[in-house]
Amino acid sequence: MKYRYGIIFLFVVKILFPLCVSSQINKFSITGNLVMDSAYSDIFLEDYSSKPKIIAHAAITSDGQFSIEHTITGLDFFKLRLDASNYLVLVVLPGEKIDVSSKASSIAEDPLITGSPNSTLLYESFKEIGSYDRRISKLYLKYQKLKHDSVAGDEIASVEAKMTDLSKQKSDFIQGFVETHPYSPSCLFFVNNLDIKQYLQTFITLNDTLFSMYPENKYVKELNYAVGVERFVQIGMVAPEISLPDTSGNIINLSSLRGKFVLVDFWAAWCGPCRRENPKVMELYNQYHKSGFEVYGVSLDTHRYRWVKAIKDDQLGWVHVSDLKKWNSEAAKAFAVRSIPFTLLLDKEGKIVAKNLRGSDLQCKLQEIFGF
C-alpha cells in the first residue's frame, strides 16, 4: 500500500509541477519607491484600454514602497495608476521583475524604470517627443495671437514655417526611433503620429517584426490590419493571390481569372447583409458575365454544409472558395478583412480598381466598364 501511495504522489507531482513552473514564468512583479510629495495610500494596476479595469492594487507604505504581482500569458500593456490623470504606462512581458522610482505627484514625469526594457524605451521616446510637442504648442499659441494682428503677416509666416519644421523633425525622430527599435512594442504608442501612407515602409518594418513576435496581442493585430490595408488592398495595386478549394475541393486561384473583370466578394452564409446583397450581385452577374465579368466568392464560413446550402438557396452561379476558417481564413488575412460584406473589383490584369462597391454603385461601375 505504501508503494502504491508513493506512485500516486509522484504522479500528482508530475502533473502539478509543470503548472507551477508555468505560473511562475507567466508571473510578473512591480515594486516601487515613490517620493511621497503628494498623499496617496493605494496604487492600482489597470489594463491599458479606453475603459480600463482594475486588475490588482497595493497599499503604499508611509515611505513610498509598494509591491504588486500579476500573471499574464504574453505581451501586455498596463497603467500603474495613482489617480485618473496620474499614471505610468508599462509594456510588460511574462517573467519581468519591474522596479519603478518616481514622484508620487507626477509618476510619469521622469520615472526610473528597471527590469522592463520596453517600458524604459517607451519613456525615453516620450521624453524626446514631448520636447517637440511643447515647442510646437508654444509656437501655436503665438500663432493664434498673431492671427488677430493685421500687420503681423511676415511674423505669422515665420511662426508657421517654424511649426512645420519642428513637426518634420518630430516625424523624423519617430521614424528613426521605430526603424532602430522595430522589435519593441513601445513603438505602438507613437507610430501613429506618422502618416501611414507617407511612411508605409516604416510601418511595414515595425509590423513584420512585432507580428512575428506577438501575433496574439490585440494592439499588434490592429497594427497588422492597418498595414495590411495599405500594403495590399489599395486601388492600383495587383490584388494578393488567393488559392483556396471550391465546394468540390479543387484549388481555384484568383489569378486564374485574369482577362476578366472580377468582383472578389467576401461573404458568409451567416452574414445577413451579405445574403441580402446576393440577389443584386446575381442580377449583375447574369447581365455582364458573357461580356467578361466574373465573381470570386470567398466564404468566411466554418461549416461546409451551411456554406454549400447558402450557395444553392441563393442560386449563386459564380466561383466559390473557402478554407472554412472564418476570420482566420488565409484570404481574409491577406486582404485585411475585418467585416463583411467586403468586395474588391479587379481589372483584367488583376489590379484593384474599386473597393466595397455594392448595389447601384456596383451597377454604375459595371455600366462604365462595359458601356451598357
Image (cartoon, grey):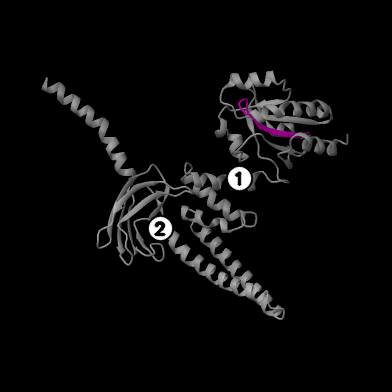
Q: Which residue is labeled 2 in the image?
A: 88
Q: Where in the figure is residue 307, as x and y percent of width and height? A: 62, 22
The answer to whether mark 1 and mark 2 are in CB contact below 8 A is no
Query: At label 2, which amino acid type do we have?
Result: Leu
Between 349 and 159, the residue placed more toward the observer is: 159
Residue at image coords 30%, 52%: 58
Separation of disc 1 and disc 2 at Cα? 31 Å
Residue at image coords 64%, 20%: 308
| Up-down relation of residue 327 to residue 126 (above or below) | above
| Quadrant of the rendered image containing residue 102 | bottom left
Name the quadrant of the C terminus: top right
Residue 103 lies left or right of residue 272; in this view the side is left
Mark 2 secondary-structure assignment: strand
Residue at image coords 82%, 37%: 364
User: Residue 232 in magenta?
Assistant: no
Q: Where in the figure is residue 79, as x and y percent of width and height? A: 41, 53
Q: Which residue is labeled 1 in the image?
A: 228
In this rendering, does residue 211 appear at all?
A: no
| Up-down relation of residue 132 to residue 22 (above or below) | below
The earlier-in-sequence mark between 1 and 2 is 2
Residue at image coords 59%, 70%: 166
| Up-down relation of residue 185 to residue 238 (above or below) | below
In this rendering, does residue 66 appear at all?
A: yes
What span is in magenta?
260-271
Residue lying furthest left: 2
Between 115 and 339, the residue placed more toward the observer is: 339
Residue 285 lies left or right of residue 158; in this view the side is right
Circle number at residue 188: none
Name the quadrant of the N terminus: top left
